[in-house]
Amino acid sequence: MILFLAARPVTAPPVRPSRPVRPARPVRPARPVRPARPVRPSPRRPRLRLRLRSRPLAPYRRIFALPGTRAFTAANLLARLPMGMLSVSAVLMIAGSRGSYALAGAVTATGLAATALVGPWTARLVDRHGQARIAVPATVLAVLGSLSLLLCVRHGAPDWTLFASYAATATTPNTGGMSRARWAHLFRDDPAARHTANSFEQAADELCFMLGPVLATLLCTALFPEAGTSVAAALLLTGVLLFAAQRRTEPPVAPAPATGRPRSPLRLPELPPLLVTFLATGAVFGSLEVVTIAFADGHGIRTAAGGLLALQAAGSCAAGLLYGLLRPSGRAGHRFLGCTAAMAALMLLPLLAAATGSLAALAVALLLAGMATAPTMVTGMGLVQSLTPPGQLNEGMTLAVTALLGGIAAGSAGGGWAVDHLAGAGAAYGVPAAAAALALTVTLLTARRRPNRPAAPVS
């Protein structure tokens, strides 16, 4: 068997034909590997809670982050504080030495009228020649007028010298207008930032007019009658000198027009109706002050008048700061109409509260009523800036302030007449309510003539 197997021929298994070998695919060159970017730890993560808390104040942090803004703002606040001191100091000084409030009121009224006439001319010179070149000599003249008034009162000079001296203070530059002009120049392409800056400026106005009379009264009563005028003149001169020294934020001087004299902003068709609204708003301020003093005096608590007026100014100051945090949505003309409508509605609250005879109710009503005046002033000043040519901003805003001063004088006279001829000071609160209604009526009648530029979105 073994031999048989060995004798058999060994046959190999059939070889299957192999498949054709496909050519290998060309190998693509590998892409160069980019080095990975180093992961940097974010320094903001540990401060996340702080950022969330401070986010509501971002608009104000944004405008004051610009170099030079804090310096000129601090100097301007120092120069603006005497605006609320000079008239009160003059009244206390003249009445204390001459024994006549009528003479004191006539002297301050003369100074107010002179300021209304000279103020726009001073502002025009500021626009034409620069803030530093005009504001400093104009302030020196005004300070000399205050010192002349002080010396005339101190040494018993004739009454006419008091009128002449106080009229010389009319060259006092509009420090608030110059500050607003700087903001308008720095943020000329950013309406949202200008809205925040105007809100801050209005709140600063309210703060100065709230603290100024208190400081003047304290100085004149605690030290000597001439102390208020002396300190106010020193603060004004120091503040303007420091403000004028901040040259890098000063607006450039507008080139002189080729046709000769520049055209007055009063010739713009949209501006006079807006100034009438400022006139009516000033009448709200003037009448509210006189009527509130008379109401407190009628209740035998004359010292409470200062606190009541401070509440009204505090409400306006707080509303101005809060209004600056809001995004200016919609059109400026529509916002101004809404602000004047709110002012007209809230000015009815003091009239209703006075009818109850409660000082506490009147205090709350004045606090709420003051919250509508600052947004009205902020939006109105924004409209003045949009209407006035860039080279005449100081003149345009000084015209608005002049209208306010005229309204304050008229409102003071109207409020005093109402207190004497109506059934008590409570009914006289109808004067500021009527003035606010007049502002709303003028705005309604002239709303179509104003520019309706939409506000830029806030990033």
Image (spheres, rainbow, N blue to C red):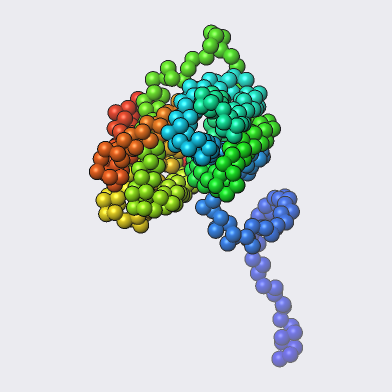
Seen in the image, is 65 located left or right of residue 307?
right
Picture quadrant where residue 435 is located: top left
Residue 355, placed above or below residue 441: below
- Seen from the viewer's position, the closer of residues 231 and 309 is 231
Can residue 441 be spotted in the picture?
Answer: yes
Q: Measuring 39% from the left and 20% from the top, which residue is drawn there?
A: 269
Give the camera-side residue of 364 and 443: 364
Is 435 on the left-hand or right-hand side of 453? left
Residue shown at the point (34%, 37%) measured from the top left: 416
Specify whether residue 393 is in view.
no
Question: Residue 77 versus residue 302: which sits nearer the camera?
Answer: 302
The single residue placed furthest to the left in the displayed view is 423
Residue 201 x/y as whole percent = 52, 40
Position of the N terminus, as image quadrant, is: bottom right
- Rendered location of residue 182, percent (x, y): 58, 32
For the point 41% across and 29% down, the residue is 406
Please say if 27 is above or below 399. below
Foreground pick, 307 / 103? 103
- Picture quadrant where residue 185 is located: top right
The part of the image, by quadrant, that contains residue 6 is: bottom right
Q: Position of residue 296 (x, y in %)?
A: 37, 50
Is residue 459 found left or right of 296 in the rendered image?
A: right
262 w.r.t. 94: above or below: above
Residue under the point 62% across and 25% down? 141
